[in-house]
Image: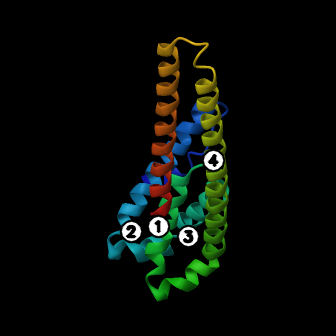
Amino acid sequence: DDYLDMLYQVSGKSEKEREEGLKLQIKGTAMILKLCKEVMFLEQLIQNSTVMGALTRVLQEEFKKSTELTFNILRIFLAFSNFIEMHGLMANYRIGMLTMKAIEYEIKRTELREADSKEKEQLLEQDIRDLKANKNNLDPADVQQQLDKIKKTKEKDDLNSKRLQRKQDK
């Protein structure tokens, strides 16, 4: 019941309240996911219409807001799908359609992230070319400092991109 209550912590008026609500939803889905690791809880969970309704509602409404929340819910549904007996109940909640919708969104998100990454890389390369072209007019220490700054920015972007890619690949 406590985990279910966390799923209903949607949003408030302010951005901070919405973030807090989203964090509670992520925590609630993570706790339900832990329950799914025990086979004896799976049947109870899937037959609990309140839990199933809340999970499908949250997935339908919030899948664009948090990949972690989406992935938690999809892993819960994956645990259910391992048992043929549960397929009918899952079909009643349109879980297949919701899953495909979330996957399509993640594919689009990845494509957009790759395009942004390429654009940023081109801008950084242009900055490097500009610095090298104007290095005679600038102090060598300033040029090196700018190059180091660009290098750090590129490394940070690459690290973030790899982290997101690993998470999404799971």
Of tags 1 and 3, the one toward the viewer is: 1
Q: Is residue 136 left or right of residue 148?
A: right
Give the x, y percent position of residue 4: 49, 56
Q: Is residue 27 left or right of residue 52?
A: left
Of tags 3 and 4, the one toward the viewer is: 4
**Along the polypeptide, which appears first: circle 3 or circle 2?**
2
Identify the image quadrant of the C terminus.
Answer: bottom left
Name the residue tied to disc 3.
49
107 relative to 117, above or below: below
**Along the polypeptide, which appears first: circle 3 or circle 4?**
3
Of tags 3 and 2, the one toward the viewer is: 2
* Residue at the far bottom in the pictured view: 84
**Along the polypeptide, which appears first: circle 2 or circle 4?**
2
Residue shown at 45% from the left, 57% from the top:
166
13 relative to 32, above or below: above
Q: Which amino acid is tagged 4? A: Lys
162 relative to 71, above or below: above
Give the x, y percent position of residue 73: 51, 62
Name the residue tied to disc 2.
36
State the CA–CA distance, disc 3 to disc 2: 16 Å
Q: Which mark is residue 75?
A: 1
Are the residues flagged by discs 3 and 4 in contact, CB closer than 8 Å? no
- Identify the element where label 4 is drawn: helix
State the CA–CA distance, disc 2 to disc 4: 40 Å
State the CA–CA distance, disc 3 to disc 4: 45 Å
- Identify the element where label 1 is drawn: helix
**Along the polypeptide, which appears first: circle 1 or circle 3?**
3
Q: Which mark is residue 118?
A: 4
